[in-house]
Image: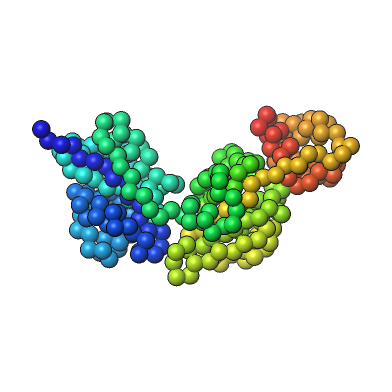
Amino acid sequence: MMEHGKLFVVSTPIGNLADLSPRALATLEAASVVYAEDTRRTGKLARHFGIGAPLRSLHEHNEARRVEEVVERLSAGQDCALVSDAGTPVVSDPGVRLVAAVAAAGFRVESVPGPSAVTASLAVSGLSGGRFLFLGFAPRSGRGRDLWMQEALRSPHTVVAFEAPTRLSALLREWVEGGAAERHCVVCRELTKLYEETVRGTVASLADYYSEGGVRGEVTLVLEAADVSAPPEGMDSHEAARLAETLAQQGSPTRDIARRLRREYGMTRNQAYEVALRAADRA
């Protein structure tokens, strides 16, 4: 009876090629096919290490079509490997649909762990890593971005996020406007590469530092957990909440509601934005 193949989910270097583990190298060398987010980028890795396995693309636009192909290969006894451009597949990268389908079909899925910008940035941040929230990339606009911002700014745990270099300044500025100006933050750029950079400070200071743009390379941010204090003594929190809900129902943006709460009730940035976010949730 023919033994079925396995799907190996393989972590690859996020910059420094020396970070490819011996097990990952052996797995890629032995695979019948390597499915890659971008065959051109993975091709460079393959040439560097002399990996001769055929490369097939698997990205967000063709993942659904590749599932049947991979299942057929596994049924025929072929081992397949899945890699992303860098780091660990499925973490803000394609592969979720494939892994789920392969597992549902009864085939074995094995992880070959290794580099990840998420854990690498958290390790050097100096912020608590006991519990953290990974949010991936911020949506460009709309309700999705608002909800993403709510999660980032309200999380009681350290937040790790990715952002494109061209949008880094805008994200930091939005965090400032959202009440996180004085929270500690770390911006990691080009992790493990020759020009690796880790810049620490408050969100406000980092927003100023990156205000002129010109940032290049892969960017990961680590944000200190939210610490929402009690309302100032004598402040009518119920009245403030009612005003916030009224404004939210009228369509006022969250940042405008927060500004008014600060002005009329003497709230801190964090307090005002927390009340404004709750109002937006109910609107």
Question: Which coloring applies here?
Answer: rainbow
Image quarter of the N terminus: top left
Q: Foreground residue, 219 or 171?
A: 219
Q: Answer whether residue 5 is visible to the viewer in this image.
A: yes
Residue that sits furthest to the right in the current view: 234
Picture quadrant where residue 246 is located: top right
Give the vertical position of 46 relative to 265 (above or below): below
Residue 234 in percent (x, y) is at 89, 37
Q: Is residue 119 left or right of residue 153?
A: left
Give the vertical position of 125 relative to 111 (above or below): below
Residue 199 in percent (x, y) is at 59, 64
Q: Foreground residue, 45 or 164?
A: 45
Q: Foreground residue, 238 or 110?
A: 110
Q: Foreground residue, 258 or 8?
A: 8
Q: Is residue 195 left or right of residue 240?
A: left
Residue 228 in percent (x, y) is at 72, 42
Residue 97 in percent (x, y) is at 35, 37
In percent of the image, x 62 and y 56: which residue is there?
185
In percent of the image, x 40 and y 55: which residue is there?
115
